[in-house]
Image (spheres, helix red, strand yellow):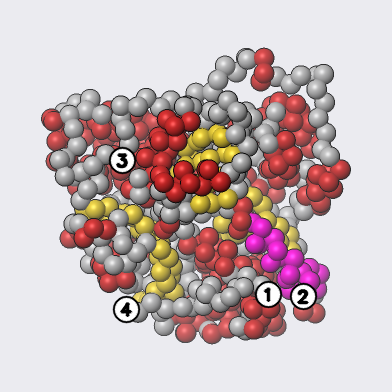
């Protein structure tokens, strides 16, 4: 399968963030087309395209829009989720920093389709300071040209966007956590139902969409649903950005029609494994996705196929681990991440993620006990599905899959009080660095 | 939860000193007024106003917590609850250069711990601490969303990608 340039068509152009370059490439044509359609027609077109949310869950976008009640007592909001915090994921950053107008155009169309109130927010993670400045500048340009503001292109539709910077909390990528954070609270997820489509930000119906999802919308309006379905397979349509990192020779963001196989992506496009070492495991969809073994990678990277293989495509953040990586150390690092990012609201997740980190650290330091592998599974069982949001479930993904697939390596640690001889350590266990 | 083991919550420096009054300079005040126009209520402006406060003072002092609370009609407890939840709000003053090393999985494979541990050792500071001359604060941070160019080090607002121990050393030498 060859690489394509559809979502990333503009990013290599010089000065790609400027509105003039974007307009030269046919930009904002989709807004003009969409504003002449009825909102329901726009939603129907997106439904027909079978676009699924690119943030992780793969929920059909058109369906999400159609859930928004008409005549709700409070204003309807569109929020853009640019809180890209899942370890291994860095695709939205490319779109934000290189082609901000594509996102803005997608937001205008989405807002029109759902009947949004005149204000909308891009929730960008606080660390993306540069991205936020790029967006701010792009929004200024769009306002000056009349694509944002009152009565856009004479259609009577008012709409504006504010960049809302997060402040370093992974949990704000969860949609209700994000909503809380926009409202100025701690980003602790809410009980569902009511779902955000009914009661979301400021009490109004709310649609939260990932950057890449919104970036697909202008393409669908311009080229039609059938064109969009021409990429990928039924129910898993469209161009998709894949982020590859870890032990590969050429890491980066790659665009393909949805459904390139993991094997082809790693060996044909990313140049294979660093140092031509052997592949050990692949995390296919960001830190929370269960690991896949080398014999499982002949797998089309689309939502349904990866789900069937027992993992998930998630945000398509592919982390490749080669034979020199100690699985216990790698899983410990992910567990540490989730322990740090648990919002502290639900006991199973708050306590459980910290225990996972402690036990994994104990095994890595040579203090493991023979029953520890089963202990990890037992703890995971007490976290999964027992809290409000999916962070707990995310935390146990790598733990369960690694214990099941690399049990021998865990037992080796317990027995020999050291890592496998072919693996190397990444941190110095002799230095006692205080927890931060 | 940014910090599971906070310092002594009753330490005197964690309370606002009534003798010290803080106020936004005129430029920041203008920005504050603009922020308020972007949200349907005052409370929603809390995160951007805290970012603004940090830009002005470099950290969120107890006095700033009270001041922001007064501006937005929120109790200091509510404001502090938000400040302590989010990682990026500094609850202590940081050095002129806030060196944040990502050590999450992709960066770890790229040997980010060598950078991080090396920096702590060379500058002789504990993680999160500032060098005595007030120049550098070294911190370990979670995924910065730049895994394709790992390891990544964020210094103040800027990303430095594809780092190595040598490159970081060279980079820090250029900072004055």
Give the mark nearest the N terminus, 4 or 2. Answer: 4
Residue linked to disc 4: A1
Give the mark nearest the N terminus, 2 or 1. Answer: 1
Give the mark nearest the N terminus, 3 or 1. Answer: 1
- Write down the quadrant of residue A42 in the picture: bottom right
Marks 4 and 3: in contact by CB < 8 Å?
no
Distance Cα–Cα, label 3 vs label 2: 51 Å
Say whether mark 4 and mark 3 are on the same chain.
Answer: yes
Distance Cα–Cα, label 1 vs label 4: 32 Å
Which segment is the magenta one?
A132-152
Residue A145 is marked as: 2
Residue occupying the point 61% across, 41% down: B176
Residue B92 in the image: above or below residue A198: above
- Report the chain holding disc 2: A
Say whether mark 2 and mark 4 are on the same chain.
Answer: yes
Residue A19 is marked as: 1
Marks 1 and 2: in contact by CB < 8 Å?
yes
Residue linked to disc 3: A426
Q: Say whether residue A150 is left or right of residue B92.
A: right
User: Can residue A188 be seen from the camera position used here?
Assistant: no
Residue occupying the point 40% across, 44% down: B165
Question: Given this view, does label 3 or label 4 mark the residue nearer the observer?
Answer: 3
Residue A363 in the image: above or below residue A421: above
Dominant secondary structure, magenta: helix
Say whether mark 2 and mark 3 are on the same chain.
Answer: yes
- Report the chain holding disc 1: A
Question: Given this view, does label 3 or label 2 mark the residue nearer the observer?
Answer: 3
- Report the chain holding disc 3: A
Q: Say whether residue A388 is left or right of residue B22.
A: left
Marks 4 and 1: in contact by CB < 8 Å?
no
User: Can residue A33 be seen from the camera position used here?
Assistant: yes
């Amino acid at each position: 399968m060859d690489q394509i340039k559809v979502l990333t068509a503009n990013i290599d152009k010089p000065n790609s963030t400027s509105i003039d370059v974007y307009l030269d490439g046919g930009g904002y044509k989709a807004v003009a087309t969409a504003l002449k359609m009825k909102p329901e027609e726009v939603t129907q077109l997106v439904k027909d395209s079978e676009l699924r949310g690119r943030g992780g869950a793969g929920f059909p976008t058109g369906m999400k829009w159609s859930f928004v009640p008409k005549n709700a007592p409070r204003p309807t909001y569109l929020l853009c989720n640019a809180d890209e915090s899942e370890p291994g994921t860095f695709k939205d950053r490319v779109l934000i920093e290189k082609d901000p107008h594509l996102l803005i155009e997608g937001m205008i169309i989405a807002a029109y389709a759902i009947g949004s109130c005149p204000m909308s927010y891009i929730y960008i993670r606080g660390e993306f300071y540069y991205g936020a400045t790029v967006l701010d500048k792009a929004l200024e340009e769009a306002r000056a040209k009349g694509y944002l503001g009152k009565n856009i292109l004479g259609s009577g539709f008012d709409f504006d966007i504010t960049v809302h910077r997060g402040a370093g909390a992974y949990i704000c990528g969860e949609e209700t956590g994000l909503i809380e954070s926009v409202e100025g609270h701690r980003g602790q997820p809410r009980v569902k139902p009511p779902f955000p489509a009914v009661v979301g930000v400021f009490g109004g119906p709310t649609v939260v969409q990932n950057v890449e999802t919104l970036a697909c919308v202008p393409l669908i309006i311009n080229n039609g649903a059938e064109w969009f379905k021409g990429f990928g397979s039924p129910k898993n349509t469209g161009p998709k950005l894949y982020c590859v990192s870890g032990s590969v020779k050429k890491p980066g963001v790659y665009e393909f029609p949805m459904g390139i196989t993991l094997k082809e992506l790693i060996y044909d496009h990313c140049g294979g494994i660093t140092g031509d070492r052997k592949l050990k495991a692949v995390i296919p969809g960001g830190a929370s996705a269960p690991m896949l073994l080398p014999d499982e990678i002949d797998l089309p990277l689309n939502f349904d196929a990866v789900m069937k293989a027992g993992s998930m495509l998630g945000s398509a953040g592919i982390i490749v681990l080669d034979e020199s990586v100690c699985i216990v150390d790698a899983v410990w690092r992910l567990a540490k991440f989730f322990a740090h990012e648990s919002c502290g609201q639900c006991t199973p997740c708050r306590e459980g993620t910290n225990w996972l980190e402690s036990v994994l650290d104990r095994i890595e330091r040579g203090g493991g006990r023979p029953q520890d592998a089963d202990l990890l599974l037992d703890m995971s069982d007490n976290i999964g599905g027992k809290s409000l949001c999916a962070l707990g479930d995310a935390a146990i993904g790598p733990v369960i899959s690694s214990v099941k697939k690399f049990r021998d390596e865990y037992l080796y640690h317990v027995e020999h009080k050291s890592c496998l001889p072919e693996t190397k350590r990444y941190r110095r266990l002799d230095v006692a660095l205080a927890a931060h | 939860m940014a910090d599971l083991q906070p310092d002594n919550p009753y330490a005197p420096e964690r309370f606002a000193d009534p003798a010290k009054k803080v106020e936004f300079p005129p430029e920041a005040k203008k920005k504050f007024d603009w922020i308020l126009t972007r949200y349907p209520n005052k409370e929603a402006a809390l995160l951007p106003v805290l970012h603004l406060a940090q830009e002005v003072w470099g950290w969120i002092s107890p006095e700033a917590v009270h001041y922001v609370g007064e501006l937005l009609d929120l109790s200091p407890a509510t404001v502090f609850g938000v400040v302590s939840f989010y990682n990026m709000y500094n609850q202590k003053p940081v050095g002129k250069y806030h060196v944040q090393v990502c050590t999450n999985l992709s960066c770890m494979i790229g040997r980010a711990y060598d950078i991080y541990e090396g920096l702590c050792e060379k500058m002789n500071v504990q993680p999160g601490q500032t060098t005595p001359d007030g120049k550098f604060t070294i911190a370990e941070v979670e995924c910065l969303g730049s895994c394709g160019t790992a390891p990544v080090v964020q210094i103040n607002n800027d990303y430095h990608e594809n780092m190595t121990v040598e490159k970081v050393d060279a980079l820090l030498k250029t900072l004055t």
